[in-house]
Amino acid sequence: MESSTRRTALKALGATLGAAAFARALAPIASASEDLSMAEVLQRHYKQLSPDEMKAVLQRLEDETWEQYGAVVDIDDTRPLPDTAFGYALNLSVCIGCRKCAEACHVENNHDRPSNQSYIRVLEIDNGTVDLAFSTNDYDHAVPQKQKYYMPVQCHQCDNPPCVDVCPVEATWKESDGIVVIDYNWCIGCRYCEAACPYHARRFNWTKPEIPAEEINPDQSYLSNRIRPQGVMEKCTFCLHRTRKGKMPACLEACPTGSRVFGNMLDPNSEIRWVLENKRVFILKEDLGTQPRFFYFFDE
């Protein structure tokens, strides 16, 4: 990767799109860009940062969180574990559509409170069909409903991720453990990745996130749940700030029915490996060739 800054990346995109298209693409982040500090403008891409540079970046972000939100946080750079390929599976036979997973995601990942944002959508679908065109995620009745089943959808951490392919500045990539990440300080908010994702798994920060200091999760990671700035994309990272430390994703721990299974697919003794070898699993939109690491199954 050529050494450059976020500013030169913006110029490169402008040259590619043309002035009019460039202005339209960046309009939502114009006000946010005006608030960028010189340190952020000059910051290099995540993959280019030396250990000392990363240490300085993390300290700056912690200081900014205190200045802007009044919260003391610990932001680290949590790297992939060796010999690890994370996978996730959902037992649709026991999911009851309670949305506890989405609520846990909202809190764990420091989402904007007014928008009630989450990386997880829970779809309510008629029994006997997998046609998502006839599903809804805005139901407001008691669950579970008869003749319905429920399908949570989030980032599928694809092995062939279209969101990565379309990013014009390489702000998103797939790591060795299978997790697709975003360098929020490199993202320019063009939203190409959002349009390319067939699972509606990416979110755009239209405004600066509002979170009371006492509600901020202080255990954060640079590529995961730190508070994202206005004007950038964000997504599920399988809670890498937890899972790369041997913990389970927050959504899994919140599930009251045990419908969620997570683990290292390279470990022959892991629960996810057992599911993949003993259950009839399926993936969404298989015909697109995205090769997700997110699987579904029913009890037979």
Image: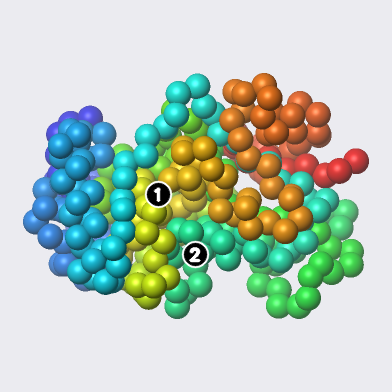
Instruction: Please tell me whether mark 2 sits on a helix, a strand or a loop.
Output: helix
Q: Nearer the viewer, mark 2 or mark 1?
A: 2
Mark 2 or 1, nearer chain start: 2
Q: Amino acid at mark 2?
A: Val
Q: Which residue is drawn at the image coordinates 67% and 21% (left, top)?
A: 268
Q: Say which residue label 1 marks.
A: 224
Give the mark count: 2
Give the CA distance from mark 2 to mark 1: 13 Å
Label 1 SS: loop
**Is 155 left or right of 132, judged from the image as shown?**
left
Q: Nearer the viewer, residue 221 or 34?
A: 221
The amino acid sitting under disc 1 is Ser
Given residues 8 and 124, the one toward you in this image is: 124
125 w.r.t. 83: above or below: below
Q: What residue occupies the far left of the structure in this picture?
A: 38
Above or below, 281 against 202 in this view is: above
Q: Please report the residue visible at 26 percent of the width from the left and 39 percent of the height from the top.
A: 46
Q: Is residue 90 left or right of residue 215?
A: right
Residue 225 location in percent, x, y?
Answer: 40, 54
Task: Tell me the quadrant of the picture where the C terminus can be found.
Answer: top right
- Using the image as rendered, state which of residue 168 and residue 77 is in the foreground: 77
Q: Tell me what residue is drawn at x 62 percent, y 28 percent.
A: 265
**Residue 284 shows in the view:** yes
Q: Residues within 10 Å of mark 1 (few under 14, many from 20)?
A: many
As drawn, 82 above or below 9: above
Q: Is disc 2 in contact with disc 1, using a CB cutoff of under 8 Å?
A: no
Split into 4 quadrants, where in the image is the N terminus?
Answer: top left
Q: Position of residue 124 (x, y in %)?
A: 75, 63
Q: Residue at x 24, y 57 (%)?
A: 62
According to the picture, the residue beneath numbered tag 2 turns out to be: 107
Please identify the quarter of the rendering in which residue 156 is found: top right
